[in-house]
Image (spheres, rainbow, N blue to C red):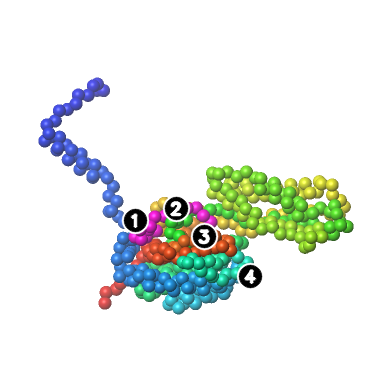
Amino acid sequence: MYGVRTPLKLDPAHKATVKRALLCAILLAMPVRSAAPSPALRHTPGSRLAENARVHAALDWFRANLSWVNEEQARLTEIPAPPFQEGPRGEAVRRLLAESGLTTSTDKVGNVIGELPGAAESEIVLVTAHLDTVFPAGTNVKVRREGSRMLAAGISDNGTGIVALVALARALQFARVKPQRTILFAGNVGEEGEGNLRGMRELVEAYRPKLRAVIVLDGSGTEHVTTKALASRRLEATITGPGGHSWSDFGMPNPINALIRGSVRFINTKVPANPRTTFNIGQIEGGTSVNSVPFAARIKVDIRSESEEELGRLETALRDSMAAGVRDEMESPRDRSKGALEWKVELLGSRPGGELRPDSPLLAALRAADEQVGNQSRLERSSTDANIPLAAGIDAISIGAGGSGGGAHSLQEWYDPVGRETGLKRALLTVLGVSGIAEEKSR
């Protein structure tokens, strides 16, 4: 039964017949990829979107109006939008959406929303761009130009995303594109700093039953797409004491001394390269004058990791470090009769993690858009407004709106609109790839 096999000898004609039979068997066994379109393409396949006359007109709108888009970006950037003070910029965006023909509103937390009704009002695609910047009130936001570049605090993050939001709405309204799913365009608050993504949290809470996809426009570029949400926490460590005079109360426990001792311990915490984990002491404050023993001192810390376990370990390390800093300060040769120190660590905000499914219709729509505009993009993990819908199990991505930029979160921030058109087209085709286009009724 398992003896030596003797090779068969076949004549040439017989060999050809056998080869043809084997080829047919292999072809029949192979899966037919084109038999059923992917969910993202069932409404309007990406390869056919740009062939639709109305979509083609919307895409052409970008090229004809690039100068207007550039000027509006500069104008919106020059309206200050510090954390928790986005109102004036939000109102300017709301007016632009209203001028585009959308029905607009402002919700209870300050998000501005424009609605483009779809044939299926029970399903929503949400397109967002955050209104706020990291810069405090009083920061110079005047835009200056150097060649093709525009330079100003917040010009790219997120002046680029805000103006793209308006441009998409205007292009669709100009071309009279009727989506299958309703599209909401939202300028949202609270993405930066201690905003804790409060604007996106409110949008997801308000529309969650109908929400089918979220597309976040954040910054410049077309070379990436954020599909993985980086979890993070923002913490504030505070040490307090009685306070006093630098001469007469010398020897009194000093909150700043204790904070420094604890901070040095914390920054020596070892973190793994994989899963990637980071920490940053971003703010430190305390004291009232150079000749006073301070009554309070505090730091604000940002911790991020691809692992929730590592986040927890870092938060514990911060708490342990502050406790040790207070202990070391109290154990120094101090006059304990003049009071003791107390410490606390409070959570200012927490961004949950999450991940887009590889077979997501939204990712398929983005890939189809990339192919249509001749772009290649890589998948990335980052901390953006997309964290909230991804954590809730809702399809979401964050993408740049074209052009290029640099110096984000610094006074040297810049944006170059060269290549903006590709980014706008990519964003529009992605939106329509998941919203679909309503069938036109025959007259």
Q: Say the numbered circle drawn on residue 379.
A: 2
Badge 2 local density, few (<14 within 10 Å), some, or many (20+)?
Answer: few
Residues at marks 4 and 1, CA–CA distance in whole angstroms: 50 Å
Q: Circle 3 sits on which residue?
A: 406
Residues at marks 2 and 4, CA–CA distance in whole angstroms: 37 Å
Q: Say the numbered circle drawn on residue 366.
A: none
| Front of the two marks 3 and 1 | 3
Name the residue at 38% across, 75% down.
174
Q: Does 381 appear in magenta? A: yes
Badge 4 local density, few (<14 within 10 Å), some, or many (20+)?
Answer: few
Residue 402 location (% of width, % of height): 44, 63
Q: Height in image: 225 above or below 112?
A: above
Q: Is residue 252 at all visible to an observer of this figure?
A: yes
- Image quarter of the C terminus: bottom left
Q: How many marks?
A: 4
Q: What element carries label 2?
A: strand
| Front of the two marks 4 and 1 | 4
Q: Say the numbered circle drawn on residue 138.
A: 4
Q: What element carries label 3?
A: strand
Name the residue at 61% across, 62% down.
194
Q: Earlier in the sequence, mark 2 or mark 4?
A: 4
Q: Nearer the viewer, residue 73 or 391?
A: 73
Q: What stretch is highlighted in magenta?
A: 366-385
Q: Say the numbered circle drawn on residue 38.
A: 1
Amino acid at dot 3? Gly
